[in-house]
């Protein structure tokens, strides 16, 4: 069991997380300073915040990073709490980009992408550090080229990590724990919600947990309804990092974390009775289970965010800025 399940799953998960972190750091290096300035200026209304939160999370590939930045800005009193509500809703939408890309089933491109990114990084480094071509070395975009190569390398690692995690499928099906989990899930899908929440809280990445589930489900080892329940749970679990980030901060920062948790719990509770309906709806769009999981997350997050958006306009939230 250790050799066939635990080692491949942990190795694949580590590769996946390293890829995501490389993408996050490289993308933030490319657009982070501009994003901070934009965040301070472009959140006048919850709708503006939602658009900004969606775009920034899709670009930075990390809802956790955007939420943590928002908490930091509120703690430093550069941004009032009420103007973060739209951003929080937007992060839930923006994080769907990663899973939608994974749902395209382009895992066979992992090694070519890694190879191309290494060549691109080598060329850009030679241009910048050794100035082999002076005119190109002086080009301001050369540094962006090197960051872009790191982004591609991280994306290749992300795909390769999922491929490694997929290898545990046949061995996983033969375990007693897997059979027990499926039996419990047949009685109530709350097991799936709980599993998604706990795994995401432990690994601090809903995208990583959902990607792992997509990889296993691709081998027809998990029913779609259970996978969607895990997706709902992962949305709750992703709030754990924000809660940790708010500890010791101002009340405004704590309000950000609490509102994030309440919004995600409310969305999961709203959609839980309709999991079977959602599963039937996404299967009309694709025959691929991983793609269906990605679509279900996108539908869930988009609908929840737009349902909650009018609530963010209540003047009651503005009064909390004075607390």
Image (cartoon, rainbow, N blue to C red):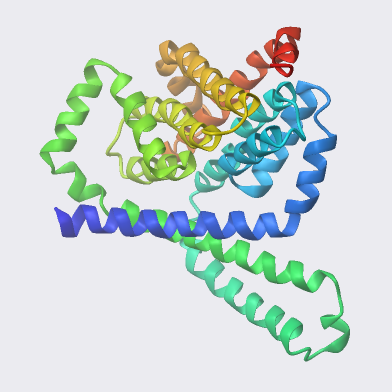
- Give x and y (percent) for residue 266: 51, 14
Residue at figure coordinates x 43%, y 61% from the top left: 160
| Front residue (pair 253, 128) | 253
Residue at figure coordinates x 48%, y 69% from the top left: 111
Q: Which quadrant would residue 316 be assigned to in this image?
A: top right
In the rendered image of this protein, does residue 209 appear above or below residue 140? above
Residue at figure coordinates x 83%, y 25% from the top left: 44
Q: Is residue 106 left or right of residue 164?
A: right
Number of marks drawn: 0
In the rendered image of this protein, does residue 276 appear above or below residue 172? above
In the rendered image of this protein, does residue 18 appear above or below residue 81? below
Q: Is residue 174 left or right of residue 86?
A: left
| Front residue (pair 1, 83) | 83
- Give x and y (percent) for residue 136: 84, 81
Residue at the far left: name it: 176
- Give x and y (percent) for residue 158: 48, 56
Q: Which quadrant would residue 164 be assigned to in this image?
A: bottom left
Residue at figure coordinates x 46%, y 26% from the top left: 236
| Front residue (pair 149, 274) | 149
- Give x and y (percent) for residue 198: 35, 33
Q: Is residue 48 left or right of residue 12?
A: right
Q: Which quadrant would residue 142 be assigned to in this image?
A: bottom right
In the rendered image of this protein, does residue 107 appear above or below residue 264? below
Quadrant of the rendering where the C terminus is positioned: top right
Q: Is residue 300 left or right of residue 272?
A: right
């Amino acid at each position: 069991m250790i050799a066939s399940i635990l080692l491949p799953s942990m190795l694949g998960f580590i590769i996946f997380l390293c890829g995501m972190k490389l993408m996050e750091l490289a993308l933030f290096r490319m657009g982070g300073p501009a994003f901070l300035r934009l965040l301070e200026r472009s959140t006048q209304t919850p709708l503006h915040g939602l658009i900004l939160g969606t775009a920034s999370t899709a670009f930075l590939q990390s809802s956790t990073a955007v939420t943590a930045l928002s908490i930091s800005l509120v703690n430093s009193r550069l941004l009032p709490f009420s103007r973060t509500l739209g951003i929080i809703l937007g992060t839930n939408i923006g994080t769907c980009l990663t899973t939608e890309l994974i749902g395209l089933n382009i895992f066979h491109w992992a090694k070519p992408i890694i190879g191309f990114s290494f060549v691109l990084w080598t060329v850009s480094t030679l241009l910048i550090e050794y100035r082999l071509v002076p005119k190109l070395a002086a080009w301001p975009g050369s540094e962006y080229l090197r960051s872009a190569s790191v982004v591609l390398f991280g994306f290749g690692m992300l795909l390769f990590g999922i491929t490694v995690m997929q290898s545990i499928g046949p061995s996983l099906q033969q375990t007693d724990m897997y059979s027990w989990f499926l039996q419990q899930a047949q009685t109530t899908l709350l097991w799936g919600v709980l599993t998604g929440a706990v795994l995401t809280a432990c690994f601090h990445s809903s995208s990583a947990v959902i990607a792992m589930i997509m990889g296993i489900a691709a081998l027809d080892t998990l029913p779609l309804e259970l996978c969607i329940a895990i997706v709902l749970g992962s949305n709750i679990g992703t709030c754990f990092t924000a809660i940790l980030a708010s500890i010791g901060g101002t009340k405004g920062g704590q309000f950000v974390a609490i509102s994030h948790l309440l919004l995600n719990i409310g969305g999961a509770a709203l959609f839980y009775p309709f999991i079977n309906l959602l599963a039937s709806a996404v299967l009309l769009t694709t025959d691929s289970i991983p793609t269906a999981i990605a679509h279900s997350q996108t539908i869930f997050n988009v609908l929840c965010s737009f349902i909650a958006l009018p609530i963010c306009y209540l003047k009651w939230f503005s009064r909390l800025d004075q607390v």
